[in-house]
Image (cartoon, grey):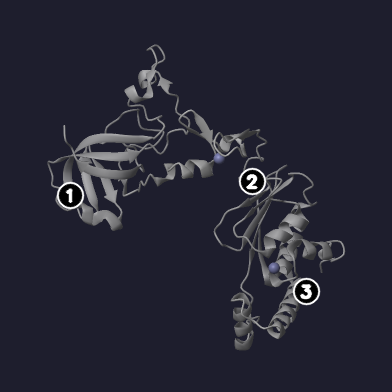
Amino acid sequence: MIDLAAHRLDALVAFHGHFCPGLATGVRVAEAALQALGARAEDEELVAVVETNNGVVDAIQFLVGCTYGKGNLIHQDHGKNVFTIARRSDGKAVRIATKPRAGHDLTPEQEQLVARVRARDATDAERQRFAALWEERGRAILEMPMEELLEIELLDNYALPDCAAIEPSVVCDDCGALVMASRLAAHGDQRLCATCVAEQGHTSLRVTEIGVVENELLPGAAPARARSPRSRVVVHEAYQQGLQGLAPGQTVDVLFVFSEAPAEAPLLQHPRGDSTAPKRGVFALRSPHRPSPIGLTAVEILEVAPEGLVVAGLDAWHGSPVLDIKPHVS
Ligand SMILES: [Zn+2]
Ligand SMILES: [Zn+2]
């Protein structure tokens, strides 16, 4: 059984704010992680990827030493009770999931009590009964055999996220807050934080993926600027009605995303990547490396089906998200 003194349970409870079943589960998750991987992370020796935010995460921060502030706690907001803790030195990792606890269901009265407390309309007496119930359930979790509570899987060569970046903080040109340099966005000749960009209306752009390209042009393997003689533009179900009125033989413009293009797009580039040709501005080129990586190609419709089009002459790679289809006007 876990040595509570060694795990500084009192200090953990003070950190979280109260003792509860979630925190107790976290103590056991931390125990399993440290058993598998060794000592607590003083620095970034261990990394935790947590797929939910609850009391378990506070126990992981406190007991395993993977903390939000050090950057070795990564929250993926899936609402899933799955916690993967990995060791940087050798990529060894442990994936810990909480099991449904058979035989530990609440009675209907207890369920009512919990609902009233969560809705914040419990009386003082009810809150006391709730606290006692939660304390009892938490204690039971601390004593349970590990295998009843947790699903534990050891992983080799876990694909570790990069070490936390240490970056300079730069002043946002609008609000003046200090912001991580990589989080500032260029806006005209200003560099702005995300909130200021949003306030200036830049998030009002509304672009939706309406479908996806299927063809033989595989990313990385297809020659640059190859056109496919036959591509399927598969339209997502919600947008299929929009295909009404299109017919074989018609020319349409397909707008798609260069999803494989790198994020940085130099404003001056060699045409067709030919380094012997003088550089030109990106807006004078059809390069996929652009501030808005959108492609536009006029194609001929070969077939119209309820779930999309078959077209000739599309130069989008297999898997490219499609943003729009519209009749071509020369
Ligand atoms: Zn709690
Ligand atoms: Zn700002």
Count of numbered tags = 3
Tell me which residue sits at (27%, 46%) in the image.
233
Dot 2 surroundings within 10 Å: few (below 14), some, or many (20 or more)?
A: few
Query: Closer to the observer: label 2 or label 1?
Result: 1
Tell me which residue sits at (34%, 41%) in the image.
318
Q: Amino acid at mark 2?
A: Asn
Q: In the rendered structure, which disc, 2 or 3, sits on the residue that comes first in sequence?
A: 3
Q: Is residue 252 above or below residue 155?
A: above
Q: In the rendered structure, which disc, 2 or 1, sits on the residue that comes first in sequence?
A: 2
Q: CA distance from mark 3 to mark 1?
A: 64 Å
Residue 115 in picture, x, y percent from top left:
59, 79
- Asked which secondary structure carries label 2, the reply is loop
Q: CA distance from mark 2 to mark 1?
A: 47 Å
Residue 86 in picture, x, y percent from top left:
68, 50
Which residue is identified by label 2? 157
Q: Residue furthest right?
A: 5
Residue 116 in picture, x, y percent from top left:
61, 81
Q: Amino acid at mark 3?
A: Glu
Q: Amino acid at mark 1?
A: Val
In which quadrant is the C terminus drawn?
Answer: top left
Q: Is mark 2 within 8 Å of ligand 1?
A: no
Which residue is identified by label 1? 304
Residue 311 appears in which quarter of the rendering? top left
| Residue 193: image tag | none
Which residue is identified by label 3? 143
Query: Closer to the observer: label 2 or label 3?
Result: 3
Q: Is residue 242 above or below residue 145?
A: above
Q: Is residue 117 left or right of residue 315?
A: right
- Asked which secondary structure carries label 1, the reply is strand
Residue 143 appears in which quarter of the rendering? bottom right
Dot 3 surroundings within 10 Å: few (below 14), some, or many (20 or more)?
A: few
Tell me which residue sits at (44%, 28%) in the image.
265
